Image (cartoon, rainbow, N blue to C red):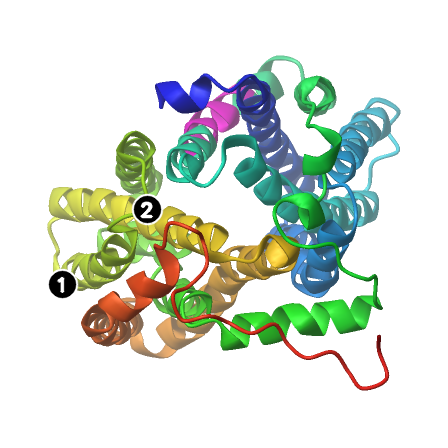
Amino acid sequence: MRRTFAIPNYRYYVIGNWASTLGLWVQRVAIGWVTWELTHSTAWLGAMALAESGPTILFALFAGTLVDRIDYLRLLRITQFCTMLYSISLALCTFTDLMSVWVMFGLTIIRGIIVSFSRPSRMTMVYNLVGRELLPSALGMNSMIFNTSRFIGPAIGGALLVAVGSAWTFTLGAALFGVFSICLRLIHFPPADKTSGATGSEPRQRRSMLTETWEGLQYIAQHPGIRPQLMLLVVTSIFAKPLTDLLPGFAAQVFDNGPHGLAMLLSFHGVGAMMGSLWLASRGGLKGLTAITLSTIILMAFGLLGFVATDIFWLACALSGLLGFAFITQSVSNQTLIQSAVDPALRGRVISIYGMVAQGVPSLGAFMIGIAAEHFGLRIPVAVGALICLGVGVRGWFLRRQLADALETDEGVPKKSVERPARPAGEK
């Protein structure tokens, strides 16, 4: 961790990223409260969440291609500045009494589009800030920042809503996003290192967006390590990680503990996530990450089975902490392995697809399990999902050596070489 923080560019990034993430959570509290005040509708609350995450699914593929084509640092500066303008717009509309639920919905869709392009550029830049050797530590610290902000941000946002109202809460969010914009201006790379095409791969001839997007999909399909990692992420995102979104139902229906019980379950979950982030940040190195990814899938399966089997609330809290540890450890290890193994020329496209799966699929899984819970109760659908994860995790464990050979090599290229997809006929 000390070696990672010794890099000046990364220090600027950490300060700005922490401020931006804090602003995100402050702003989310205000958006949720204003939406509720305007509508008193849970459907609108869900619509606002969909407005922010939906564009990521729609634009992720093309956003990754764009990151691979242009200067990703410049793209991140632009998107972060647009995010600040978005928060200023929220504040101004609230100050001037022009805010309505449809204005909020439209602005949130714009925010979702901005995030579609900022996330892959941000994730791509981390690799180039610290290099492959320190990537596990850097991603672990990024996870620590996110989970710390997840607790501090809502507390600040809630206090501001009570003290000064939503307009000033949006104003603080804009100021925190502005801090990241300033920090990004302080980051400088040598000209040869700014674009992904100059990080070790040979310059490539510019082709159409559709062709390059299809190339990224083919690359993932042919890679012996990245393809299985994304498949594992899809499985856990559908059948395990939706538990976080279902905790309100468990707190109310299963443990009969209401809002206080939900707060306890979420707090233990967050503490477990923080411990997993800290462990990965201090651990460093790629060796053994494949085994960690697979073992945490097995761990989360047993944690889920224990969680749905118990009626003891404090045991459920402890298991929620265990699941928080397993969820974040699997996610960060998975991303680290993918980032380390990918061809630099296709990093933006691959990481964008990773972000689409990691951010969009859990909401789909929560929707599926939620529908099943309407007919069978909460315990049975979650238990079925746990058994599916257990089977996939055990199967992957027997293949861990082959996966490690494809993902944990010193050069970042699988021992079994992966051919780049052939260009369509007629292209030079």
Residue type at mark 2: give it: Leu
Sequence-wise first label, 1 or 2: 2
Residue 305: quarter of image: bottom left
Mark 2 = which residue? 286
Is 387 placed left or right of 259 in the picture?
left
101 or 410: nearer the eye? 410
Look at the image and tell me whether residue 304 can be seen: yes
Mark 1 = which residue? 309
Dot label at residue 161: none
Task: Determine the residue positioned at 72% across, 36% down.
Answer: 192
* Mark closer to the observer (1, 2): 2
Residue type at mark 1: give it: Ala
Give the alpha-carbon distance from disc 1 to disc 2, as whole Å.
35 Å
User: Magenta region, mostly helix, strand or loop?
Assistant: helix
Task: Determine the residue positioned at 54% across, 55% down.
Answer: 359
Q: Give the x, y percent position of residue 345.
A: 65, 55
Element carrying mark 2: loop
User: How crowded is the residue under tag 2: few (<14 C-alpha within 10 Å), some, or many (20+)?
Assistant: many
Residue 249: quarter of image: bottom left
| Residue that protrudes farthest toward the bottom in the picture | 425
Q: Give the x, y percent position of residue 352.
A: 62, 56
93 or 240: nearer the eye? 240
In this picture, is 424 found above or below 306?
A: below
Magenta residues span: 147-156
Q: Give the x, y percent position of residue 14.
A: 53, 23
Is 391 placed left or right of 193 in the picture?
left
Is 320 inside the magenta-drawn segment? no
Task: Determine the residue positioned at 49% across, 36% down.
Answer: 131
Q: Give the x, y percent position of residue 373.
A: 36, 72
